[in-house]
Image (spheres, rainbow, N blue to C red):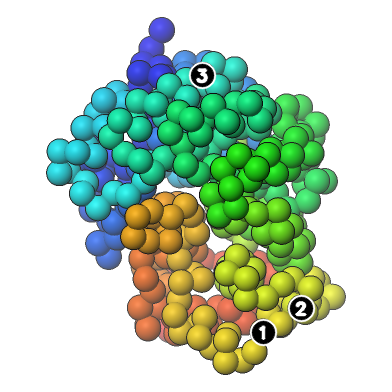
Amino acid sequence: MGLESPQYVRTSLAAAMTMGKVPGKFYRDAKLYCINILLTYDEGCHAKCAYCGLSGSRVTDTEWTDNSFIRVDWPVFPVEDVKRSLVDGTAPHVERVCVSMITLGRAREDCLEVVRDLSETISNISILITPTILNKDWLEEAKRAGADKVGIAVDTATPEIFDRLRGMGVKGPHKWEKYWRTVEESVEVFGAENVGIHLIVGIGETEKEIINTIQRAQDVGARTHLFSFFPEQGSQMEDWPQPPLGTYRRVQVARYIINKQLGRVEDMSFNDREQLTSFGISEGLLEKILTDGEAFMTSGCSGDTMDNACNRPFGNCTPYQASIGHWRNFPMKPTPDDLKVVRDQLWDYSLEYIEPTEAELDLE
């Protein structure tokens, strides 16, 4: 047996840097405000999601515990090291910890044990759960253990795409109906504003489909934490392209409008490709949103002082892409110069994303 949960967990590379375990510096001095940890087991995850770096179907030359996820390594540390970093002054700005499960029966009790352990040190603890292996009683136990927020990685915008990429299409165990039932149960247990779904832009849906799904979640009391697809090497979708920047920007603004209850999908307009053409709000309100820039920041669980404590620097793009203005989620407040670029991207209706080379940029 290797270094397994509940005594050990994997942390994102950003979290390892923040805890002082791995040397490194964030581009533009970004800071991570949420320590993201992942339960770890020698046998890995039993799900087979087509886009996931942790999928049991991923083809790599490494053991599951050495596989990257969201493009980066997730090193293993004792839970005690995580707790120590939260109180010894190493990361005084951290406002939240998120414990992520995988699809494995042992993860049910181990997640609860890790939450109980962490709750001795920090009060803001999110759990990113696997609906397939749990029920409402478990959710109530998780709340008693110390979790205050729940994340559910629905990921896909339609039941057809869900089944193709996560269910029968890949011989995986997940079911669309079970995920949404768990969203509703989580709201019942933890309350509105304390539940969020993950959605990934760019895995086969239209803008209208994913914005409708954001509205569906909002209507049952769950917010949306938005991700932009990035291909994982060795996954079944390793050759799938990133979505166009214009598409992602429009969905970001629509999510912000819906989650802030400034408008609804029914008021928005779409073209024949189901690309968003009008946000259905006044020009003055839209201008205020575009000037403020929060809509383009990472959407995640809140902390003590900020709405987006789970800000995942570079989770959806490379540092090079960020350096040329192709941020997907800003991990900090965008500057006025950033927002000038974003405004141009917002109304770009290109159907594919093409990353310019350094040579091409030099010619501009």
Apparent side of residue 1 relative to residue 351 in the rendered image (left or right): left
Instruction: Give the residue furthest to the top.
Output: 1
Q: Amino acid at mark 1?
A: Ile
Front residue (pair 14, 295): 295
200 shown above or below 11:
below
Q: Amino acid at mark 3?
A: Glu
Q: Answer whether residue 144 is visible to the viewer in this image.
A: yes
Among numbered discs 3 and 1, the one appearing first in the sequence: 3
Give the alpha-carbon distance from disc 2 to disc 1, as whole Å.
Answer: 8 Å
307 shown above or below 271:
above
Among numbered discs 2 and 1, the one appearing first in the sequence: 2
Quadrant of the image for the C terminus? bottom left
Look at the numbered discs 2 and 1 and tell me whether their residues touch, using CB distance below 8 Å. yes
Q: Report the residue at 62% width, 71% height from top.
A: 261
Give the alpha-carbon distance from disc 3 to disc 1, as whole Å.
Answer: 46 Å
Q: Toward which corner of the image does residue 52 lie, by quadrant?
A: top right
Secondary structure state at the residue bearing disc 3: helix
Mark 1, residues whose alpha carbon is within 10 Å: few (<14), some, or many (≥20)?
some
